[in-house]
Image (cartoon, grey):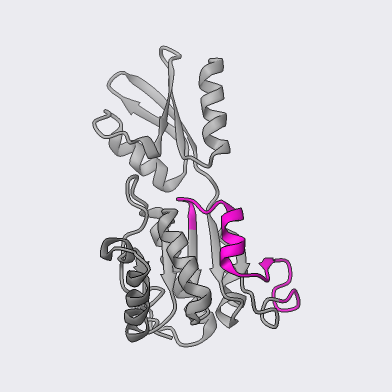
Amino acid sequence: MKRALLEALNEARADRRAAILVSELATGSQRLVLEDEGFAGDPLEAEFAARFASAKSGMIETPAGDVFLTVHVPPPRLIVIGAVHISQALAPMAAIAGFHVEIVDPRTAFASEDRFPGVNLHADWPEDVLPGLAVDRFTALAALTHDPKIDDWALQHAIERGCFYIGALGSRKTHGKRVERLTAAGLSEAALAAIRAPIGLDIRAQSPAEIAVAVLAQVIEALRKRDATESAVPKQGANAA
């Protein structure tokens, strides 16, 4: 690999940007494709989209010969706002699924190591924590406190940072009031459409553990259906806890 190409790849990985190294086996030529720069019109456009979504490297056949695609996709992160019962079930499941999990809650009675052993826990306000976590396009955020003073700023930050998934606990009525507050804060209707509320896939979940399953499933769905130019696609669930 040429030095300039290696440096570009290393820079992309350091910046948590998805990239594919395209290697033509017959000629030895290589090029780098960055997801956030777009690849529309490329002969391998469909293959790139599929590989960015699956994060799997592999060989493909083309009219010009075999090409190996080495896929570099940042590990996904899940930030949970609220050290609640749902979070206690969600955190270990998300970790098993490959997500780096962070839980943020200023309420020290909830955000304790006893309740969340082995979890990255931040007993502070989202506005004090999230800027230091470098929230990005490969971050999912689930707001679960039901408290506007805690959830609202986090949701706004997630929208501004282009998170691939943004979900919020609450009924449709609760979300309607949330939309009113965030609209007053300056967010557009299009921006607010990124929030999935009620949170989670519609599996008629009842218990905290079931809601956690519904949330994680929706997060994984959003990750695997991630579009190269969109941060989040709204899809309403029915877990209106």
Instruction: Identify the residue at the far right of this view.
Output: 114
Q: Nearer the viewer, residue 79 or 96?
A: 79
Quadrant into which the N terminus falls: top right
Quadrant into which the C terminus falls: bottom left
Q: Identify whether 187 is placed above or below 199.
A: above
Image mark count: 0
Residue at x-position 34% and y-position 65%:
186
Residue 101 visible in image:
no
Q: Nearer the viewer, residue 154 or 143?
A: 154
Residue 200, how many percent across, how many down? 41, 74
Residue at x-position 56% and y-position 64%:
127
Instruction: Identify the residue at the far top of this view.
Output: 27
Q: Is residue 163 magenta?
A: no
Residue 58 visible in image:
yes
Residue 75, how many percent across, how many down? 55, 49
Q: Identify whether 78 is placed above or below 53.
A: below
Extent of the magenta region: 112-139
- Please identify the quarter of the rendering in which residue 92 is found: bottom right
Residue at x-position 40% and y-position 25%:
67
Residue at x-position 41% and y-position 75%:
199
Q: Identify whether 198 is placed above or below 26.
A: below
Residue 130, how many percent across, how many down? 57, 60
Q: Identify whether 70 is placed above or below 182.
A: above
Q: Nearer the viewer, residue 166 or 94?
A: 166
- Please identify the quarter of the rendering in which residue 164 is found: bottom left
Q: Is residue 118 magenta?
A: yes
Instruction: Identify the residue at the far left of this view.
Output: 41
Residue 109, how many percent across, how many down? 70, 83
